[in-house]
Image (cartoon, grey):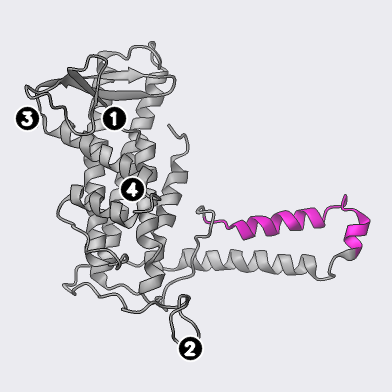
Amino acid sequence: MDGNPSAMAHRLNYATHNADHVRLNPAQRLAVQHLREQLRRLLRKRNAYASFIRAAANSPMGLGKQPTPDEQDVAYELTQGFFEQVYATLSALASVHGRIRVHLAQSEPPINSNDKFLTWWESVGAEGWLSSPLETLRASRDFRTVFMHPQMWPVFDWGTLSTGDDIRVVLHGAQSSKGNIPPGSTRATQPAYWEFFAPDMDEVLGAFEQLCHATFGPMFTWYPQDEHATACVWEPDGIGSTIGDAAAKALRESFSSRDLDPAVRSRLDPHFIEELDDYIRSMTNLRERAREAPVASAYPSGIPAARPSPAQLAPFMEANGDEAD
């Protein structure tokens, strides 16, 4: 598993941050807030599982060997909690789409069924750019359904599979009297039996990250920018210290070095280092102001969801008001 969960926390924040820059009503902001809370809960459950993996690695059996019965039971319990949270997080994303329309070329998203909601996403990503995250989330939904509704299937058992750095829960059982197996499962070596390995938790988080980009990325197309939004601390690298900042600091270090070739130094603009310092200082001040600004909060208001503008907004408009080609 990824050993740096804080990086994923940054990535998920960045994937949703466009909502902070457009004009939304309080009900819409509350839906976004709920999604972020569910994403944080999902990440915490993944981190709890990662902590368990690290602890199991230090046990007498170690990873790659047979876990103890207690370790297997912990793996089962933590896996159950994670995939229950997947369902809640997917529902929160559906709630956002029920209140904020961003893919107007598609039909209204079905928000009362996570299965139908994922099918709707397939039409959004019809060119295949969302195939991988949707496949992961559908497998997660199916795994949770089998995991949490054993009454729907012939009685099945479970176990764990240990690899060099992971322990995965696997469900397995016999096919039904009609030869059916649960959706998402695969037939085992013996065709009359099936198995279903828990989807990788990091891949699930990555799938949510991609759907959040697909959700919040188009917001500037249809919703006006919020004039009162605080300065943005997120930039293309998704970590909060911009690529431009890093480049400016690297350039300053290189061009102010005593080892710089004199021929290169002689060709530099006299104000080059000074302008780099001004840029670095201004970006630092911007982030300090943004950190000091109060965090906006949403509250239930009963205000109906706002309708998006029927026409595209800048920068998708020509100066005369006509849509760009």
Closer mark to the observer between disc 4 and disc 3: 3
How crowded pointer 1 is (Cα within 10 Å; few <14, some 14-19, many 20+) is rated as many
Q: Secondary structure at mark 2?
A: loop
User: Marks 4 and 3, Cα distance to the nearest angstrom?
Assistant: 31 Å
Tag 1 residue? 198
Is residue 22 at all visible to an observer of this figure?
no
Looking at marks 4 and 2 on the same chain, the residue that comes earlier in the sequence is marked by 4
Q: Which mark is residue 151?
A: 3
Q: Nearer the viewer, residue 192 or 53?
A: 192
Residue 213 - label:
none
Lower sequence index among marks 1 and 2: 1
Label 1: state its secondary structure.
Answer: loop
As rendered, which of 320 and 306 lies closer to the eye? Answer: 320
Give the number of the mark in front: 2 or 3.
2
SS state under label 3: helix
Q: Secondary structure at mark 4?
A: helix
Q: Position of residue 70 (x, y in %)?
A: 25, 17
The residue pinned by badge 4 equals: 40
**Residue type pointed to by label 4:** Arg
> Between 198 and 232, which is closer to the camera in this rendering?
198
- Cβ–Cβ below 8 Å for labels 4 and 2? no
Q: CA distance from mark 4 to mark 1?
A: 20 Å
Q: Tell me, yes or no, whether the two marked residues, 4 and 1, touch with CB atoms within 8 Å.
A: no
- Indicate the position of residue 288 as horizontal and vertical percent values: 54, 64
Residue at 43%, 40% in the rendered image? 5
Q: Earlier in the sequence, mark 4 or mark 3?
A: 4
Q: Amino acid at mark 2?
A: Asn
Tell me whether circle 1 and circle 2 mark residues in contact (CB < 8 Å).
no
The residue range painted magenta reads 240-266
Residue receiving disc 2: 320
